[in-house]
Image: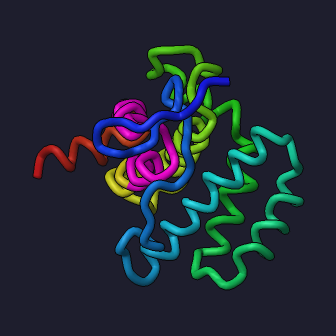
Amino acid sequence: MAKSEMNEQGKTTSPKGGSKGPRKGKPGGGRKGPAAARHESRCLLVQALYQWHMNKDSITTIEAQFLVDNESKKYDKPYFSELLHEIPKKLTELDSAYVLFLDRTEDQVDPIERAILRIGAYELMHRLDVPYRVVINEAIDLAKNFGGEDGHKYVNGVLDKLAGRARMEEKQRGRAK
């Protein structure tokens, strides 16, 4: 197994753009109120979906563990629970939606970035109450915090293209402003 290295900026990198876990960390990313709680839910979702993908634990077991381990955190528990249960149920639909915009096979996408793409795809396709720009910005922040060094650029490109398809009208309205 290859070792992580330090780049010129003093950040750790791992081979093939692999994940190194959280690198920076104000809870809520400087957001306040409901936006901070929703952001924290997404951070926990990345970790929960990664655990589900890697360990094949049941969603119910993962949810119970996360509820206990994070009971003192301020996060949007209903949102966390909805996405944690719905993303695996709609996995084929979500993966089929974003895989069109990958420049590699789905198996070659880092598992953390794949979790972020699934969250973003779900929100773009099933949570129309969340503006597409918020979905993309949150995914970029998640990738910066949890993903490989340039993973946020990749996530941004894929979700921006998916938004063009899933939220075409909303995206066009945004350009007209």
Q: Is residue 59 magenta?
A: no
Q: Residue at x 29, y 37 (%)?
A: 8
The total number of labels drawn is 0
Looking at this view, is 109 or 135 the one in front?
Answer: 109
What residue appears at the point 72 percent right and 81 percent down from the top-left corner?
71
Residue drawn 27% across the image and 44% down it: 171
Q: Where 165 falls versus 56 (above or below)?
A: above
Q: Is residue 156 visible?
A: no
Where residue 132 appears, as percent x and y from the top left, is 37, 51
Is residue 14 placed above or below 38 in the rendered structure?
A: above
Would residue 71 be visible to someone looking at this image? yes
Q: Residue furthest top?
A: 104
x%, y% of residue 11? 39, 45
Judged from this view, the residue extending furthest toward the left is 177
8 relative to 101 in the view: left or right? left
Q: Position of residue 17 (x, y in %)?
A: 49, 29
Q: Is residue 153 magenta?
A: yes
Please provide the residue range marked out in magenta.
Answer: 138-164
